[in-house]
Image (spheres, rainbow, N blue to C red):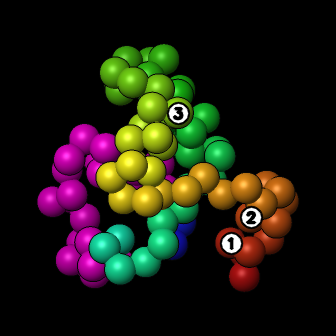
Amino acid sequence: IYLDTHVAAWLYAGQSDLLSPRAAKLIEEEELRISPMVILELEYLREIGRLTVGGNSVAQSLSTQLGLQVCDLAFAAVIESALD
């Protein structure tokens, strides 16, 4: 499953209690991915002071903790898949 920026930030911050029970279950059971855009958005949140670490640090930490992968598909393919 693809995580959005908010969920990635919540998981990094240890705020899994903000997830619905169904979302928490899926996160435990499924392969996790984020779009490279999430890294950019997390970096922006660091720049404006909403996070203390950048997007790459969040992605790397979640990769270690949860096996999160950054999608390596062409961005246009990701958008097309999401629209389906």
Which amino acid does the dot numbered 1 rest on?
Ala
Mark pair 1, 3: CA separation: 23 Å
Residue at (35% x, 80% y) in the render: 29
Q: Is residue 23 visible?
A: no
Q: Which residue is mark 3?
A: 56
- Three-letter amino acid code of the residue under disc 2: Val
Quick one: 53 or 66, which is closer to the camera?
A: 66
Q: Nearer the viewer, mark 2 or mark 1?
A: 2
In the displayed structure, would residue 55 be above or below residue 70? Answer: above
- For the question of whether residue 7 can be seen, the reply is yes
* Mark 3: few/some/many CA within 10 Å (<14, 14-19, 20+): some
Q: Which residue is mark 2?
A: 78
* Screen quadrant of the C terminus: bottom right
The residue drawn where x is 74% and y is 74% is 81
Q: Amino acid at mark 3?
A: Asn
Task: Label 1: state its secondary structure.
Answer: helix
SS majority, magenta: helix
Residue that mark 1 sits on: 82
Q: What segment is highlighted magenta in the picture?
A: 3-26
Magenta stretch encompasses residue 36? no
Residue 45 occupies which quadrant of the picture? top left
For the residues carrying marks 1 and 3, which lies nearer the camera in this image? Answer: 3
Position of residue 8 measured from the top left corner of the image (x, y, whole percent): 40, 50
Residue 4 horizontal/vertical position (percent): 49, 56
